[in-house]
Structure formats: C-alpha cells, structure tokens
Image (cartoon, rainbow, N blue to C red):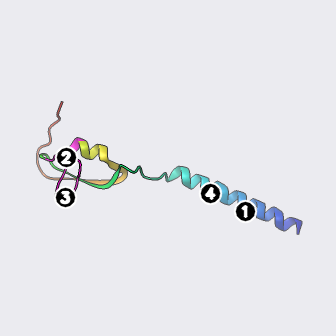
Amino acid sequence: MKNRIIINKNLLRSFTIIAFMLTVACPARPVHALGTVFVSPTGSGSACTPASPCDLATGLSTVDAWGTLYAAGGTYTASS
C-alpha cells in the first residue's frame, strides 16, 4: 500500500507540473483582442470587420497573437 501512495503522489506532481507548463505556454487571449481583423487603406473606426474595415494601425493594435489580419488591396501610408 505504501508504494501505491508514492506512485499517486508522483503522478499528481507530474500532472501539476504539466498543467503549470501549459498555462505558461498557452496564456488566455486578451478580452479586447480579435482573432480576425480586416483593414483597408480607407478604413476607419474600430469594428475591423469585412463590412467595416479599420485602418492598418488600428488593425495591428487589435489583432491578437494568434489572429489573422486581412489587408485589402491599395496603398497604405503612415499617418503622423
């Protein structure tokens, strides 16, 4: 019986370490970030949808690390 308890403690320790590693490696997405963002050279606002694309700067600050940014064709210029 004593060996069985040690195995269970080791198993629990291993699961705890794996759970911690997954939590660190795969953090939750920020609430304000979007997975898919649409931008265009004439975009405005902050919806960043196909029907209402935003500008490139807003799109870049809105898309999350796992997201996709779709850029419509055209010339994008930097604004000051």
Point out the image quarter for the N terminus: bottom right
Q: Give, as a three-letter code, the residue at label 3.
A: Pro
Q: Give, as a three-letter code, the residue at label 2.
A: Gly
> Circle 2: is it few (<14), some (14-19), or many (20+) Cα within 10 Å?
few
Closer to the camera: disc 4 or disc 2? Answer: 2
Q: Which mark is residue 18?
A: 4
Q: Secondary structure at mark 1?
A: helix
Which residue shows up at 41% across the image and 49% down it? Answer: 30
Q: Secondary structure at mark 2?
A: loop
Q: Which mark is residue 11?
A: 1
| Among numbered discs 3 and 4, the one appearing first in the sequence | 4
Label 2 with label 3: CB-CB less than 8 Å: no
Label 4 with label 2: CB-CB less than 8 Å: no
| Among numbered discs 3 and 1, the one appearing first in the sequence | 1
| Among numbered discs 1 and 2, the one appearing first in the sequence | 1
Which residue shows up at 55% across the image and 55% down it? Answer: 22
| Among numbered discs 4 and 1, the one appearing first in the sequence | 1
| Among numbered discs 2 and 3, the one appearing first in the sequence | 2
Q: Which mark is residue 50?
A: 3
Q: Position of residue 56 (x, y in %)?
A: 21, 44
Q: Position of residue 29 (x, y in %)?
A: 42, 52
Label 4 with label 1: CB-CB less than 8 Å: no
Taking the magenta stretch, the answer to whether it contains residue 30 is no
Closer to the camera: disc 3 or disc 4? Answer: 3
> Circle 1: is it few (<14), some (14-19), or many (20+) Cα within 10 Å?
few
Q: Give the residue pinned by disc 2.
A: 45
Q: Give, as a three-letter code, the residue at label 4.
A: Ile
Q: Main secondary structure of the magenta part?
A: loop
Residues rendered magenta in the picture: 43-57
Q: Give, as a three-letter code, the residue at label 1.
A: Leu
Q: CA distance from mark 1 to mark 2?
A: 52 Å
